[in-house]
């Protein structure tokens, strides 16, 4: 499928942002929560901003379905982080 110039520009910016900022920090968060750590206020803000940015992705995926596997992997990573963070919070609350 051929991409419009607009979609190509959007995809390039989103992929650059993902590679340079979102993904490295998300992987750091994954390691932290997998080690039982809690999210900081900054971490929560990061996740909130990522979720807000994600609202634009379904429209792009409708026009450019080749990005669906990548989007699924990224969404799965963020889902893992939030689920594990919640589990860690509950474990701390139980101990306390």
Image (spheres, rainbow, N blue to C red):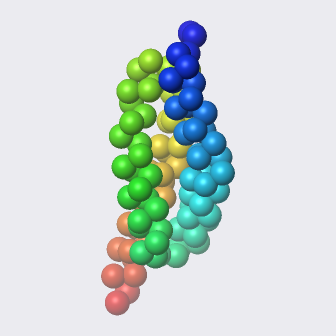
Could one spot residue 1 in this view of the protein?
yes
Could one spot residue 34 in this view of the protein?
no
- Closest to the observer, 4 or 72: 4
Residue 28: x and y, percent? Answer: 62, 64
Residue 86: x and y, percent? Answer: 38, 66
- Closest to the observer, 5 or 83: 5
Quadrant (top left, top right, bottom left, bottom right) of the N terminus? top right
Residue 77: x and y, percent? Answer: 52, 49
Residue most extreme to the bottom: 96
Is residue 23 left or right of 92 when viewed as pictured? Answer: right
Q: Image height check: is 34 above or below 60?
A: below
Q: Image height check: is 66 above or below 91?
A: above
Q: Residue at x 39, y 30 (%)?
A: 58
Q: Image height check: is 63 above or below 10?
A: above
How many callouts does the rendering have?
A: 0
Residue most extreme to the top: 1
Residue 92: x and y, percent? Answer: 40, 81
Q: Image height check: is 82 above or below 5?
A: below
Quadrant (top left, top right, bottom left, bottom right) of the C terminus? bottom left
Q: Residue at x 59, y 60 (%)?
A: 25
Q: Residue at x 38, y 58 (%)?
A: 48
Q: Quadrant of residue 11?
A: top right
Q: Residue at x 50, y 36 (%)?
A: 72
Q: Quadrant of residue 16?
A: top right
């Amino acid at each position: 499928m051929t991409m419009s110039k607009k979609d190509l520009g959007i995809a390039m910016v989103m992929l650059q942002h993902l590679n340079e900022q979102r993904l490295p920090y998300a992987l750091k968060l994954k390691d932290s929560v997998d080690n039982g750590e809690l999210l900081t206020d900054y971490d929560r803000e990061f996740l909130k901003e990522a979720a807000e940015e994600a609202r634009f992705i379904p429209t792009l995926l409708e026009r450019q379905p080749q990005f669906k596997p990548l989007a699924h992997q990224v969404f799965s990573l963020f889902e893992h982080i939030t689920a594990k963070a919640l589990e860690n919070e509950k474990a701390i609350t139980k101990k306390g």
